[in-house]
Image (cartoon, grey):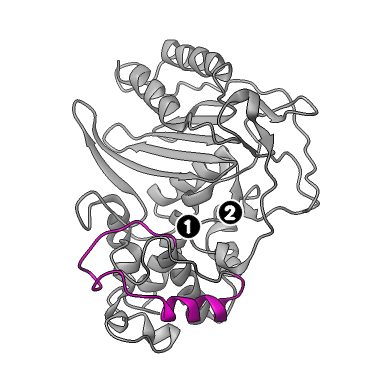
């Protein structure tokens, strides 16, 4: 496994108030309460970084707990983490950019780009891959992720789970197929496409794929069921099948810039952007889960989990508040942290 080089510095809370109190829901008192909550939750196993953004102003950006438990190195606001299924948002944007440029249609059958699939798989569309309704592979079926060729063959040879479009089931395999389509349409790697069309335009200098020897300020990931049982869990080497649903490392600031770039239409025009913001099927937009919360309104949520990392984005659309949570263990603190922050923000 490649060696991780970690350099961290003490974090500070960043709080800006550019709006009048009448326009702002997030005030200094709430930020202090959230900071106190997160600090207390470190004792319950929380370890990570949190950013809160209101109307494109960063109100809180801070690290908590340890990036390296052996060397006693703290997380900070710039620490990078594996973001797990938050990667899917980057894949969605890439596909929608290609649709916007007329390089593909969301209604295209996937075999137009990936070779022949037997019926009924040959009826599956890009739209269905985006919405987890393609039904190509049964839950728990083992696929081969080592190369694009063997992955595609393993999907084609798998039993059918359901008729395309008939049933929703969240699956990573569909998003790996989307990565393959991105590569086929552009005749370049998935990584090169994202670098050229998302990372560079938004100056996401702390976002990359897999672990690299020269990278600094990366959190180690830990696995275990309790704080006392946490052990360093070395992420397996990055393979082709990580593309699409996972495999990206980033910090909270770059994810904030990514969400701001979406909202400022730097990546997509309005027509295609709306497909990420509004339900395409019940509870699902492209990339985001859509949650309607009483007394709060619409929330776009995207989370992820690995044996050693967790991630969560919660975007309160009516208030334009973005909450980004990255965690370097799998003690399942993500939901309680999100709930605690939400309770303070909305009383």
**Height in image: 9 above or below 110?**
above
Q: Nearer the viewer, residue 237 or 75?
A: 237
Q: Residue at x 27, y 81 (%)?
A: 120
**How many numbered discs?**
2
User: Where is residue 311 drawn, in percent x and y?
Assistant: 50, 40
**Height in image: 235 above or below 252?**
below
Q: Which residue is mark 2?
A: 248
Q: Reply yes or no: does residue 275 show up in magenta.
A: no
User: Where is residue 346 drawn, in percent x and y?
Assistant: 30, 20
Q: Residue at x 46, y 17 (%)?
A: 34
Q: Residue furthest bottom?
A: 116
Q: Nearer the viewer, residue 38 or 260?
A: 38
Q: In which quarter of the view is residue 229 placed?
A: top right
Q: Residue at x 22, y 69 (%)?
A: 165
Q: Is residue 65 visible?
A: no
Magenta segment, principal secondary structure?
loop
Q: Reply yes or no: does residue 158 show up in magenta.
A: yes
Q: Is residue 340 visible?
A: yes
Looking at the rendering, the stretch of residues picked out in magenta corresponds to 146-172
Instruction: Determine whether the residue tagged by mark 1 lies in a helix, strand or loop.
Output: helix
Q: In which quarter of the view is residue 322 placed?
A: top left
How many C-alpha atoms fall within 10 Å of the one at disc 2: few (<14), some, or many (≥20)? many
Q: Which residue is mark 1?
A: 90
Distance between mark 1 and mark 2 Cα atoms: 9 Å
- In-image side of 347 versus 178 (left or right): left
How many C-alpha atoms fall within 10 Å of the one at disc 1: few (<14), some, or many (≥20)? many
Check if mark 1's residue and mark 2's residue have beta carbons within 8 Å: yes
**Height in image: 102 above or below 22?**
below
Q: In which quarter of the view is residue 247 placed?
A: bottom right
User: Upstream in the sequence, badge 1 or badge 2?
Assistant: 1
**Height in image: 298 above or below 275?**
above
């Amino acid at each position: 496994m490649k060696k991780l080089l970690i350099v961290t510095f003490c974090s500070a809370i960043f709080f800006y108030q550019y709006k009048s109190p009448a326009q702002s829901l997030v005030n200094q008192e709430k930020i202090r309460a959230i900071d106190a909550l997160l600090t207390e939750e470190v004792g319950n196993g929380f370890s990570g970084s949190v950013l809160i953004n209101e109307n494109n102003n960063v109100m809180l950006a801070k690290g908590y707990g340890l990036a390296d438990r052996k060397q006693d190195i703290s997380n900070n606001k710039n620490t990078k983490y594996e973001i797990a299924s938050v990667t899917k948002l980057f894949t969605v944007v890439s596909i929608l950019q290609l649709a916007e440029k007329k390089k593909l249609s969301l209604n295209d059958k996937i075999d137009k780009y990936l070779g022949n699939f037997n019926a009924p798989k040959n009826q599956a569309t890009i739209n269905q891959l985006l919405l987890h309704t393609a039904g190509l592979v049964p839950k728990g079926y083992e696929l081969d992720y080592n190369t694009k060729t063997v992955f595609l063959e393993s999907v084609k040879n798998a039993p059918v789970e359901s008729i395309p479009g008939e049933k929703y089931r969240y699956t990573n395999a569909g998003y790996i197929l989307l990565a393959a389509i991105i590569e086929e349409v552009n005749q370049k790697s998935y990584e090169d496409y994202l670098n050229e069309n998302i990372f560079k335009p938004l100056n996401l200098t702390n976002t990359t794929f897999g672990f690299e020897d020269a990278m600094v300020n990366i959190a180690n990931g830990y696995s275990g069921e309790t704080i006392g049982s946490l052990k360093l869990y070395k992420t397996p080497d990055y393979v082709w099948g990580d593309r699409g649903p996972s495999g990206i490392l980033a910090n909270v600031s770059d994810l904030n810039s990514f969400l701001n770039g979406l909202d400022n239409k730097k990546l997509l025009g309005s027509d295609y952007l709306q497909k990420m913001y509004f339900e395409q099927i019940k509870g699902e937009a492209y990339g985001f889960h859509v949650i309607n919360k009483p007394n709060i309104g619409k929330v776009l949520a995207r989370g992820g989990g690995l044996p050693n990392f967790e991630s969560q984005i919660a975007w309160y659309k009516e208030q334009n508040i973005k909450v980004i949570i990255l965690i370097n263990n799998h003690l399942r603190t993500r939901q309680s942290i999100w709930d605690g922050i939400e309770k303070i923000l909305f009383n």
